[in-house]
Image (cartoon, rainbow, N blue to C red):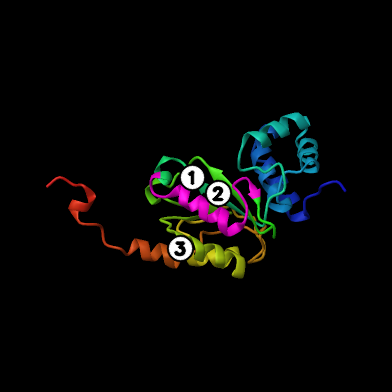
Amino acid sequence: MAFALTPEREQQVDDVLTRYPERRAALLPILWLCQRQNGWISPDVVEYVAERLELSTSIVKGVVTFYTMFFDEPVGENVVWVCRTLSCDLRGGKAIQERLESKLGCKAGHTSSDGKFTLLKAECLAACGQAPMVQINDHYYENLDLELLDRIIDTHAAKGAEAAAAEFSTFASFRAPTGGEAGDRNSVSSAPPPPSREAVRLASQPPPPADERGDES
C-alpha cells in the first residue's frame, strides 16, 4: 500500500510549501512530518515525498541518508542516542553505553528484542557541560550516572516516554507544534513542557566552592 499522510498532516505539508519559493526547499520539514507518522523513511515515503515535491527519488534518498536524524530502516518505539564524543567519554560515556547495551539486550546500532528501544551512538549532542548524557526521542537526559540511567529506562518501559521525560529530562523539547493527543508518540507539543524534577534539582544546587572550580585566588 502506498504511503499517505493523514489529512491533518497533508494540511501541514500545504502550509509548509507556502513558506518557500521552491518546493525542494521544503524537503527537510516534509521528511520530518512523514517520519513522525511512519516512524522511519521507508521506500514508500521516499516515493511520496518525491512526487509531492516534484523531485527524483534519488535526491530524496540522498538527503535521507545524509542526515542521521532520518531513519532509513525501522527503529524501536524509543530511539536512544548515547553521546560518545570527548566530553561525555571523559565523564563516563563508555560506561553509559555499556549499561544501555546490557539493560536493553542489544548493541549500539540495533533494536531491543521487544521493539521498545533502538540504541544509537552520537558523536556530539551539544550538551558538553552536562556530560555524560543521552537523548531519548526528543528529550535530553543529562549529568547521568548508572543509577539515574537505570531509573530513566525503567520509567520509559513501565510508564512511557512522556512520563519519563516529565520526571527526568533536563532539556526542553525541540519539537515544533503539530498538534496531537497527549501521550501520542506522533504528537508534538505546542509549548515547552515545565521543567522536570531533575532539572529543578540541578538548577537549585549551589555553585561549587572557588577551589573546586579551579578559580585563581
Residue at which label 1 appears: 125
Q: Of helix, strand and loop, which one carries label 1? A: loop
The label shown at residue 81 is 2
Real-space Cα separation, disc 1 to disc 2, in angstroms: 9 Å
Residue 94 among magenta residues: yes
Label 1 or label 3, whichever lies nearer to me, is 3
- N-terminal of the pair, mark 2 or mark 3, is 2
Q: Which residue is mark 3?
A: 148
Q: Which residues are magenta?
A: 90-110
- Give whichever of discs 1 and 2 has the lower sequence position: 2
Q: Given the image, on which type of amino acid does mark 1 rest?
A: Leu
Q: Give the residue at x 69% y 46%.
A: 15
Mark 3 burial class by Cα count in 10 Å: few <14, some 14-19, many 20+: some
- Magenta stretch, main secondary structure class: helix
* Cβ atoms under marks 1 and 2 closer than 8 Å: yes
Q: Is residue 113 visible?
A: yes
In the displayed structure, would residue 53 be above or below residue 209? above
Which amino acid type is marked by label 2? Trp
Question: Which residue reaches farthest bottom?
Answer: 159
Q: Position of residue 36 (x, y in %)?
A: 68, 51
Residue 194: percent from left, percent from top:
47, 65
